[in-house]
Image (cartoon, grey):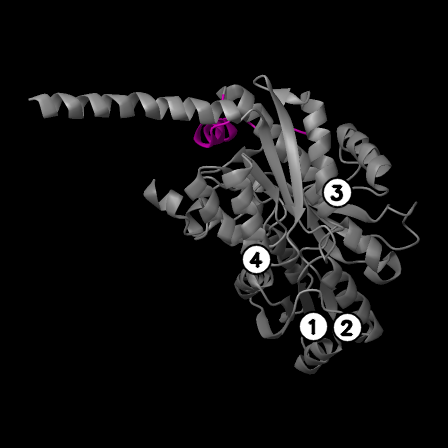
Amino acid sequence: MRYARIVVALLSCCVVAVPALAQKAWAQNKAVKIGVLDDMSGPYAENTGPGDVAAVKFAIADFGGSVLGKPIEMVSADFQSKVDVGVGIAKRWYDDEDVDMIIGIPNSAIALALVKVAGEKNRILMPTAAATSALTGKGCGSNSIHWIYDTYGQTKTIVSALAKQGGNSWFFITVDYAFGLAIEQDATGFIKAAGGTVLGSARHPLNTQDFSAYLLQAQASKARNLIFANGGGDIINGVKQAAEFGLAKQGVRISAPLAQFPDIHGIGLKIAQGLLIASPFYYDMTPQARAFTDRFTKEIGRPPSFIQAGTYGAVMHYLKAVKAAGTDEAKAVLAEMRKLPINDFMTKNGHIRADGRVIRDMYLMQAKTPAESKGEWDLVKMVATVPGAEAFRPLGEGGCPLVAKK
């Protein structure tokens, strides 16, 4: 009996000690901390990187700099286009630096890996820059929100428009990792659904300077449509070199479903004119969008990409959810994020689905001719609005385990 009393006493000490340790850990977590994990100097830096950092700073300032009596802090890092580097930084932030939410990540392979990490650590992941639709498909996670765009929505918008213009043979020049492969896979589905045929594809490494070998393969295929399944600097280099090869003059229609405004600017309207892009944002879509653009341009020296504009909205929504939840604990915050409607300068009445996909309207835009442009950044014109319910993959078709459970 004496030994039994000793055991009970020891267990009682442990029960008291665990909450005490938890309270101590909570007390040490004196800030709501956001990590911007991004490409700061590589092929995607223009559309993400320093501009994402600026957008997060704007959001923190506009929210008042604190929430729940805690300061809102930001850390940032360059993942150097390496999966192991990006995953290592994220784990260190979650484990050692009390980062509550990581945003950015313009690398689909890193983003897919971090979905699992965020779930294991019970922290939040918002891959605003990663594009693969697998993030809300088989690679979805309960702690991840895919905020802005994906390869399904972008390619559906572009391919559907091009298919109506005729020419049913297609060729891909694809960056050889998860992002590019997702573009090619999603686009192929829409091409076949429209009665088209894919004649081939050529894979290239990230940050390629010379596309001549891949363009020769495209020429040899005799395809009437050429899709650049890549992003950032690879789009700029590829489209410019396609012009040097005279592909458009030979009747080949060129598209880049993941092109953004800085890419059109980098290509130049003389070459880019007529290029179709899909975007949830444009500078003059609302007075609020114009005000954000002017503010961003003053800070960075040029207007924002749609990723950078969307990153601002993502942080604001996250902070609103923290305030509504009364805590920065991940599960409670995620529940509030899913409850709250999304309304900001680029999204009206958006919402987060069970698979983590944010549903918002998308816009089909076309690069202007040099004669149509009224200034350096007057680059595109609106062609059509695609309602969010039509732009993104139906909830039951992605294979997300979270949806299957329901």
Toward the viewer: 319 or 121?
Answer: 121
Number of residues whose C-alpha sits closer than 10 Å to that of mark 2, classed few (under 14), some (14–19) or many (20 or more): few
State the separation of the CA atoms marked 2 and 3. Answer: 37 Å
Of labels 2 and 3, earlier in sequence is 3
Q: Residue at x 60, y 62 (%)?
A: 180
Instruction: Tell me the number on the disc at residue 102.
Output: none
- Element under disc 2: loop
Q: Residue at x 68, y 51 (%)?
A: 39
In this view, which residue lies farthest toward the bottom?
220
State the separation of the CA atoms marked 1 and 4. Answer: 35 Å
Instruction: Tell me the number on the disc at residue 51.
Output: 3
Instruction: Tell me the number on the disc at residue 224.
Output: 1
State the separation of the CA atoms marked 2 and 1. Answer: 7 Å
Residue 146 falls left or right of residue 161: left
**According to the image, label 2 marks what residue?**
251
Of labels 4 and 3, earlier in sequence is 3
Q: Amino acid at mark 2?
A: Gly
The residues colored magenta run 327-344
